[in-house]
Image (cartoon, helix red, strand yellow):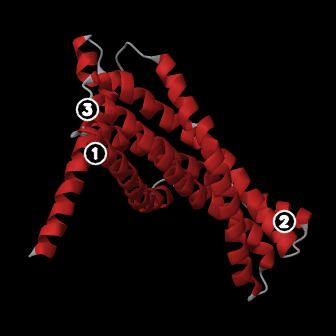
Amino acid sequence: MSFVTAIGRVVVESVRAIGEAGMLFARSMGSLVRGPWYFRNWAQQMLELGNRSMPIVVVTALFSGAVFALQVWEGFEKFGAVELVAFAVALGMTRELVPVLASIMVAGRAGSAMAAEIGTMKVTEQLDAMETMATDPVKYLVVPRIVAAAVMLPVVVVIGDLLGITGGYLASVYLNDARPSVYWESSFAFITLDDVTSGLIKSSIFGVMIAVFSCARGFAAGGGAEGVGRATTGAVVTSSMAILISDFFLTRALLTLWGL
């Protein structure tokens, strides 16, 4: 019975988190179409999610591309198809690996910061003070983060795509003696705009998920510093799980419905 209780608690908690995030997203979209718009907050959040997230994305993309190239080379070499390694790396980076890994890294860095900041404001009653001063906390705090995540994550992913392909190039050329000119030609010979667009669409949706789930966790925080810690942990876990689960359905939809 304890096992069943634990499973039920996880299910109920998951449904509650999804419901809170959905309600917050709906409220945010309603606030987005009505003024005032705090453009300075938008710019600050774009800087936070874009520029300040680049170091971890650079390292993640570069080494992920290198590792992927080594593994693919090992498999393709058995069939005498090493000339396809560059294409496989480029396709894997642009369509799947960089959008997912970059989003999870941003969730760990920026998502946790969102939940911690809003959660601290919640437990110290700063959100109540904002409402007393006729300032909507959702419009002031959540909307800028959603907009920034939706806009800046694709920008981060584009840079990550280039670095991931570069990592594959370095591993293939300097560790497996691939010809540099052939590698670059093979990387971009068969990659289409649809391949890049698919990753950018997914990354933008992932960015919205990160912002919504993280902010929802912050608004639900309670119980002092311990509650803020739980909200921060929950934001990272929930955002990461949402990214991984939704990735399957987004990939399926993009392939079957839009042919991307």
Identify the image quadrant of the C terminus.
bottom right
Identify the residue at image location x=53%, y=25%: 44
Mark 3 to mark 2: distance in Å? 55 Å
The answer to which of marks 3 and 2 sits earlier in the sequence is: 3
Q: Nearer the viewer, residue 123 or 136?
A: 123
Label at residue 198: none
In the rendered structure, are the residues bearing label 3 and label 1 in contact, judged by CB atoms less than 8 Å apart?
Answer: no
Q: Residues within 10 Å of mark 3 (few under 14, many from 20)?
A: many
Residue identifier under label 1 = 226
Kind of residue indicated by mark 3: Val
Mark 3 to mark 1: distance in Å? 10 Å
| 203 up-or-down from 70: above or below | above
Residue at disc 1, secondary structure: helix
Kind of residue indicated by mark 1: Glu
Residue identifier under label 2 = 183
- Residue 125: give x, y in percent of width and height: 24, 25
Q: Residue 138: name its quadrant.
A: top left
Q: Residues within 10 Å of mark 1 (few under 14, many from 20)?
A: few
Q: Residue 142: name its quadrant.
A: top left
